[in-house]
Every structure is written in structure tokens, then in C-alpha cells.
Amino acid sequence: MRLQRALAVLAIGTATAMPGGSRYAPRMGAQTRTLAARGESPAAFGRRCIPADCVAPSSNIPDIAPHRAQDARWGPRSAVVAPLRRGPHGADCAPWGGSAGRLAALRATLDFHHGPLATTVNWPLHNLDLAGSRYSTLDQINRSNVKSLVPRWLFQHGVIDGVSNQTTPIIVDGMMYVTDSRGSVYAVDAADGHLLWSYDVTARLGGGAREGYVFRNRGVTYGDGVVYTAGGSFIFALDAKTGKPIPTFGQDGQASVILDVLTERYTDVKAAISMGYWFTTAPQFFNGVLYIGSTRSESHIPGGHVLAVDAKTGKVLWHFNTIPQDEKDQGWDVAGPTWVGGERNGGGIWETAAIDPELGMLYMAVGNPFGD
């Protein structure tokens, strides 16, 4: 089934004023309203505005319960806790932004032009902040008015067969960044949903070849004017304003970080995916360093890798194997005696890291203890 992936923004009320006095969404013609009411859509790309009197179509996303049941068999998750190290440019691990004042300024920069509902907040990281709290003090949407939410605009970034969209949008200075299931990035105006730029990672990864990417991606992260996305087994660095690759990061904005780690031990490996390694999580950004974990539940990977990557150059600063393979890996003195016979598999990482700057600690959740 061809699935149309869309990003929708909801607003309270049906007649919120926009600049110039227009309604919050342009009126559609009769034919377009009919198509929307039937669940049909025009072109796969572009901005879609839905007026309040349009009937929302029922979902055409297939039942994902079997996939959830399959994922559930891996059982409870454990966690990896690792100390943070000094940043690549000599900076200590100070609290993000350096002061509460800078954090407050970040929280007050975005303006949707919603009239009385103009107090908004930047969401620069996958889980909002380093702690992964996803908590905002904004109260425009609350228990009393959530029932009044209506679509404000709809952005469709393309059509992909048979995959789910798991991205979390981030917002910085009025621009919203989302990914599709391959890791390709789309920047849209957060006020009206029109496309500002897009970057297709598959153009750098052999088109439809599955070597470079997998059909799951949970979004991007932002740091120092750069948007980072993990496409397959690579990390891409893009200018946040223009979407152009950062030439000093890896090879013209693309860094093969997992492969760089694997070749230290497996000298004959040519592609990370050949060993079952890729990314599904959004990177974490702190103090000039990207932190990310690798995973793939259906592969018997020899441990998930936690990587610290220089955000300017794309070079791996250090890495940690969640399932130590031999005495070269940290934790072997503890893990060595607990594994008997066979391969030392599992330990994939499925979520973005949390960081405590004061303690200098990194926290990673670990799943799929062993593939069956």
C-alpha cells in the first residue's frame, strides 16, 4: 500500500487571525474539499491547508499491531551509563547554553504569529533538552481546550511504500525540521508549513540500495547552526538555513562513523550494514559532540555501539560496545565470565541519549538482548 506521510500542526479555534487579517487556513475550492473529505490527496509534496469545515479522512495507515507484537518479544530494556569526556576542542562539560538566561532566550525566540497565542518555545533536540524530559511550561494547550484543536496546516513530504514515519519534529527560530523514514530532511516554515528546503540522503547512498539506509528514522538534532541526521549507517551535517552539506564534516557532509569503528576490529568489512549495523535514533548534541547508538533488532549484531563524534569534523572521538567482545572492550572483566559459548550478540540502542552535564554522564537505553 502506498502511504502518504504528512506532518500536521494543530491550532485552537477556527478563526485565529493571521497577518493581514486572513483566516488561519486559506479556503479550498469545492473539488479540493471533496478530495480531502474522501481521504484523497493532490501531489505528494507541498503544503496542504485544511479548513475547519473539511471532514478529516480516516487513517490509511495499515495496522501496526503485528509489528508491535514482534518488537515486544525482545523483553525489558536495560541501560548503559557512560562518563562524558572533554569536548574535541578542549571545552569542559558545562551546562548546555552556559546559563539559565541563554536557555530562557532560546525558549522565547519562536513566533508563530498566532495573535494572542504568540508565546512559543524552541525544541532544538529530539527530546527537547539534554535530560530528555520532553516537558514544556507552555500552557496555551491544556486539558480544558485540547478538545478544540483543529488542523492549521498539513505538510506532505512524500510517498514511501510500506513503512512507518517515526520522526519527532524539532523547531529552531521559526523553522521546523523533520525526516522521512530514510533519514532525508525537510525544513518547513513553522508558521504556515511551506517547504523551505529538503535534502535527500538516498542521493548519497546509492538511491534505492539498502546498503546505506533503512526505512526507519526518528528525526534530527540541532547544534550551532547545523542540523544532523542519521541516514542508515552514516551521519549527515546540513546547514540549518540552507540545507547544504557542511563540507568539513566527513566527506562533504557525510561521515561513515559506524564503518570507521568496525574496521578497527574487522579489517575486511566494506559496508556497516553487511554486519547488521545502522542508526534508527536521532543524535544527541552537546558541547560540540554528537552522541548516538547503533541498532538493528533482526540482526545478531556483536553488540550495539555508543559513539561520540566530533560535530565539526565527523571523526569518531570514542566508542563503547554494549556487549564486550574481547579484552579490548571496556567492561570485559565483568562481561567476559557471564557469556558462555556462541556469539556475544544483542545490545542494540533504540533511543536518543540523555546527558547530565553536572555529573558528566551519558545515559543510553539498550534493547534486544538477543535475536531469535
Image (cartoon, rainbow, N blue to C red):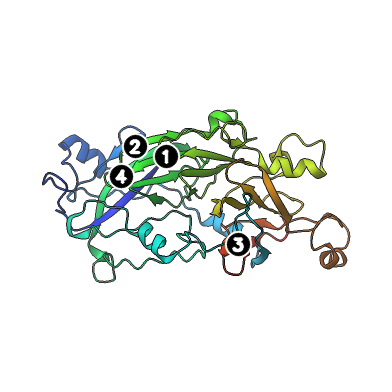
Question: Mark 3 highlights which residue?
Answer: 72
Query: Residue sitting at 17 percent across and 39 percent down?
Result: 28
Q: Position of residue 85 (x, y in %)?
A: 66, 58
Mark whose residue sits in front, 3 or 1: 1
Is the residue 38 above or below the residue 125 in the image?
A: above
* Residue 195 marker: 2
- Tag 1 secondary structure: strand
Q: Amino acid at mark 2?
A: Leu
Q: Nearer the viewer, mark 4 or mark 2?
A: 2
Q: Nearer the viewer, mark 1 or mark 4?
A: 1
Image marks 2 and 1: residues in contact by CB distance under 8 Å: yes
Q: Earlier in the sequence, mark 4 or mark 3?
A: 3
User: Which residue is tagged 1?
Assistant: 186
Q: Amino acid at mark 4?
A: Leu
Residue 294 seen in render: no
Name the kind of residue labelled 1 in the image.
Answer: Tyr
In space, the residues marked 3 and 2 are separated at their CA atoms by: 37 Å
**Labels 3 and 1: the sequence-earlier one:** 3
Mark 4–mark 2 Cα distance, whole angstroms, equals: 11 Å
Answer yes or no: do the residues labelled 4 and 2 have beta carbons within 8 Å?
no
